[in-house]
Image (spheres, grey):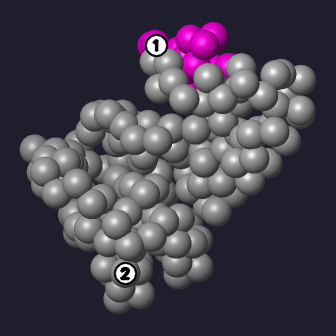
Amino acid sequence: MAEEEFAELGSDRSLLLVDDDNAFLTRLARAMEKRGFQTEIAETVSAGKAIVQNRAPAYAVIDLRLEDGNGLEVVEALRERRPEARIVVLTGYGAIATAVAAVKMGATDYLSKPADANDITNALLAKGEALPPPPENPMSADRVRWEHIQRVYELCDRNVSETARRLNMHRRTLQRILAKRSPR
């Protein structure tokens, strides 16, 4: 590929990938290298923070839940060392509350897994405050309801009775909802 194709990346093409799923991490690293990034990978929070302390990258893709902690620790460390870094938080546990927390900690964007390399690249290279295009497959009404219930449940420290009271719902109804898997 020609250098002009990578001009959008800027002069510093360093990209930190932090995920505890080794197969996904390897595939993503290869795909991002094909797009012109110079990747470094880490499978733990401590390894990610060590890379950030050694040489803070211009870009980062960080999984939220890792074996040894929360990926937001890496986001925070990178934000301290390199405030202008573009950071995308990835997670298989998509919830509105975690997305808000990630953005407050300094993430540029938040994507739910499975996200492909094109989605990640677009999120990393998005400029300014422009709104992203609407999703091709928006959340269903059931999913939005589930997210809201989960958020209130977490705000109530996972107390079912308090959550039911705040949602104006019978406790047993809430327990049945919480026992089910999240809708797609």
Which residues, given as a range, are shown in magenta? 130-145
The residue at which mark 2 appears reads as 46
Q: Is residue 157 magenta?
A: no
Of the image marks 2 and 1, the number of the one nearer the N terminus: 2
Q: Residue at x 42, y 47 (%)?
A: 90
Residue 13 visible in the shown view: no
Q: Amino acid at mark 2?
A: Ser
The overriding secondary structure of the stretch rendered in magenta is loop
Question: Percent x, y for residue 21?
Answer: 22, 54
Question: Percent x, y for residue 106?
Answer: 61, 61
Few, some or many C-alpha atoms within 10 Å of disc 1 (few <14, some 14-19, many ≥20)? Answer: few
Q: Residue at x 56, y 11 (%)?
A: 140
Q: Which mark is residue 60?
A: none
116 lies left or right of 52: left
Query: Which structural element holds mark 1?
Result: loop
Question: Percent x, y for residue 169?
Answer: 83, 22
Query: Which structural element holds mark 2?
Result: helix
Find residue 162 and report its image quarter. Answer: top right
Find residue 39 and report its image quarter. Answer: bottom left
The residue at which mark 1 appears reads as 137
